[in-house]
Amino acid sequence: MVADTNSADELGALQKKRITLEKIVRIALAVEQLNDGLQSVILLGKPLSSASPKIKGLIAQLEEKVRLQPSIKIKETLVHLEKSIKGKLEIVLDIAEMDDEQLITLSADEEQVETLLRMYAKNAQTAVALKGVLHARGEITRPTPFTVDTEVIVKKLVEISAREKTCRNRVMLSVMTMIDEAKALLSNAGLAETMRNMLEITVANLDLNLNHIQAGKSIESLPVPIEIVEIAGDDVTTLESGRTTQQHFTPRPPPPALQQKKLNPAHKASFFNKVMRWLSTPKGTTWKDIKEGRDLK
């Protein structure tokens, strides 16, 4: 009975670590998407030159998809993407100023923010790739003009790039800790067979994700959905960490290495309200319109 109680306690502790891992992964994903988006914004604002392997791969994919499309059509798509990217740059930079607690709170409150960051990075990368396709056709492409100074964007990108490395390290450390603790539980000879099978699957899945991250691949493309094992009597329930899953947790303060300048509560609430207003406004409303209150007139 004591052994069963100890196992239940250890499983409960493992479950709490999994909830923490869910939070860390969501933060890391948001920072990764910010980094991808801002890197592409910098490339858009410069004369076309050598791109990263990731962008080159996207150029190769697009060349095959658009090879039958006339250049004028590709230019129209590029103009549309550039307009969207420029219109959302200020809010993306504002989100980049948020600390871990603010990021995870905003993400939990409104999943449209996750979509915003994902689509912003995708659109910015696609715009760079389209310029590459046009360049390969001998078409003239010009730097995309932004209202925000390039120095401001570069400075923020440097900060975000360093933060992304820290976030990835936190994810790896958390995954390794979970693997070690799950293996320790598996060494318990009295562990129920159902739970043993579940833990073995969990360890295998975590190993796949760990190898993926250690290989330098993106958080967004983790090979296995992260799962939470919940214990209720003798029942075992797994919850996938997809967007349909309702997760509730109380964020802890981020470590000193990730601390950003904090907003005071009034400023924080005001910013969140502006984000939510902006997400619900008609197409064409800019972040500047929201900040200046023109959507309320």
Image: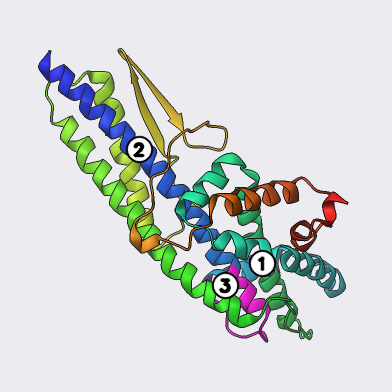
Amino acid tagged 3: Gln
Comparing 194 with 81, the one in front is: 81
Q: Are marks 3 and 1 in contact (CB under 8 Å)?
A: no
**Residue matched to label 1:** 124
Q: Secondary structure at mark 3?
A: helix
Q: Secondary structure at mark 2?
A: helix
Amino acid tagged 2: Arg
In this view, 227 is above or below 259: above
Residue 97 visible, this orientation: yes
Is residue 44 on the magenta stretch?
A: yes
Give the residues in magenta: 38-53
Residue at image position (49%, 67%) is: 160
Amino acid tagged 1: Ala
Q: Specify whether 139 is left or right of 124.
A: right
Q: Position of residue 42 (x, y in %)?
A: 61, 77
Q: Secondary structure at mark 1?
A: helix
Task: Give the label on residue 50, or none.
Answer: none
Comparing 33 with 73, the one in front is: 33
In 3D space, how far apart are the residues under numbered discs 3 and 1 (Cα atoms)? 9 Å
Q: Position of residue 77 (x, y in %)?
A: 81, 66
**Residue matched to label 2:** 18
**Residue matched to label 3:** 39
In this view, 100 is above or below 52: above
Is residue 268 on the magenta stretch?
A: no
The part of the image, by quadrant, that contains residue 110 is top right
Residue 283 visible, this orientation: no
In 3D space, how far apart are the residues under numbered discs 2 and 1 (Cα atoms)? 33 Å
Q: Position of residue 243 (x, y in %)?
A: 56, 38
Q: Earlier in the sequence, mark 2 or mark 1?
A: 2
The part of the image, by quadrant, that contains residue 49 is bottom right
In 3D space, how far apart are the residues under numbered discs 2 and 3 (Cα atoms)? 31 Å
